Amino acid sequence: MVRDYTMSTVCSGHRAVLACLVIGTFAISLSNVIIGHLAYNLSSLYQPEEFNRGLSTFERITNLDGEIIYDGEYISHILDGELPFPVNNNLKRLKFRPGSLPLSSAQSLQKCYINSTRYGNQIPDKTVMLASVSDTHKLIYRNIPKSSSSTARHAMKDFFDGNDRRVKHDELELAVHQLDYALISFVRDPLNRFYSSFDESFFRLGPWMGSGPIVADKPRVKKWYFENKYKVEKYPYLYEGLPTIGHFRKVYCPPDELSISPLACNDVPSIENGTLAHRFERFVRDYDGREPFDVHMNLQVSNLVWGVTGNPLPVTKLYNATEADKGWLDIAHEKGVHIPDGQLTHGRRITRRFNVSKVSDATKRKICRLMALDYCCLNFELPEVCRTADDDEAVFCALDKIPKREGDKIDIFDELVIQQ
């Protein structure tokens, strides 16, 4: 049955509206929205009897301060075409909670589209996709920084005969849909990943990358730093009083360990007293999520869509990065590959340099809003601190309706306004 509605990806910051519409003809996708109050009056929603027919085994809707929040299972029935979008000319959006869909992350991703123009700075590859490919085992791994990517690339190279290559759109579609290749990746909770992403990016863009012992024999790293350091200049407070790597290490590394070797600092808990955490919180307050200053700061979902269209990659399965070893052992079992005990983990397990325990709940909730696309498109449940947020800080996902105009053309609404 041809449907006369599609989904938009709609994202809003705390103050500014970052609404975006991406059209997929005769398709349904998932969208995310950080919502205070919608421009549409959902509290006066008309609910016909057939709305709930055959779905009495689970809760369809709840009322949150006059707004309707839909059950994820009900939304999934609409996504699967088992139920129609509610019959109401005034209803254009169904809100639901992140992580509530009875779908895997890979299944949820296939319903999701993002605006590749609006989020262009988040998408690392435009016309081609960098991946590790094993023709021997018909396996393609898509790299996502700070989501067990080091372990994954090591596993592909050493155990699956994989090699890095740039893959075009039609080549990937052919491999997955006709040649029986599996496209996989690893994802993790967006909040915890954001901590790791910032920590890594902070180190990579520090002034010690312009001169000093770290880059003394790394001219390419030094060149990259000077080409990209302008991206952090809008946050001048990040590196105040930290002109060298020595100054930086003294903030987080115990003196006894530092006297032994700088590398020893990577294996012990940070001693920072909140100096770095305070800078992190200030950065989060200033950051709008649109222009990450390093590739490690990109959204996970932005690595899983085509840069030209914003359509999702034909991902076969997404594994949990926090259980990466188990994931690779499962993959090895399916492919008939033997991985010796203790030979898998290859990640850069470095102690986080800033003290996460010093991060306020308000900052955590802002991060959840910044990561809303990941929470919604990958169907991650929000952490407790973000689930209990006030309405103006809450994160919801949304299924949007855009009616057909004529023929194969879709009528696009004006930019949807989120009032906060």
Image (cartoon, grey):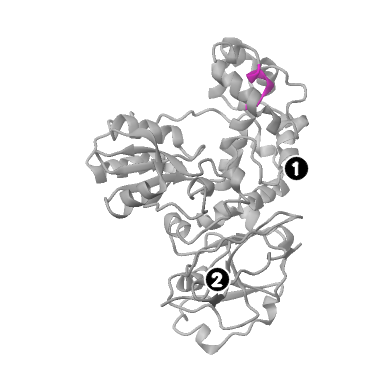
Q: Is residue 100 visible?
A: yes
Residue 270 visible to the viewer: no
Residue drawn at point x = 31 percent, y = 48 percent: 175
Q: Earlier in the sequence, mark 1 or mark 2?
A: 1
* Left-right relation of 174 to 130: left
Q: Quadrant of the image for the N terminus?
A: bottom left
Q: Amino acid at mark 1?
A: Asp
The residue at the point 65 percent across, 81 percent down is 45
Q: Is residue 159 above or below residue 178?
A: above
* Quadrant containing the C terminus in the rendered view: bottom right
Considering the numbered disc 2 on the image, is that residue within a helix, a strand or a loop?
strand
Q: Which residue is mark 1?
A: 286
Say which quarter of the image contains residue 122: top right
Quadrant in the rendering for residue 218: top right
Residue 388: give x, y in percent of width and height. Answer: 66, 59
Element type where label 1 sits in the image = helix
Pick whichever, 269 or 4, lies toward us: 4
Question: Real-space Cα distance between discs 1 and 2?
Answer: 37 Å
The image shows residue 335 at horizontal and vertical percentages of: 24, 43
Most extreme residue toward the front is 407
Q: Is residue 312 above or below residue 232?
A: below
Region in magenta: 205-210
Type of residue at label 2?
Ile
Find the residue positioned furthest to the left.
336
Q: Position of residue 228 (x, y in %)?
A: 64, 29
Q: Is residue 209 magenta?
A: yes
Q: According to the image, label 2 marks what residue?
A: 410
Please tell me whether residue 148 is drawn above or below residue 262 in the rendered image: below
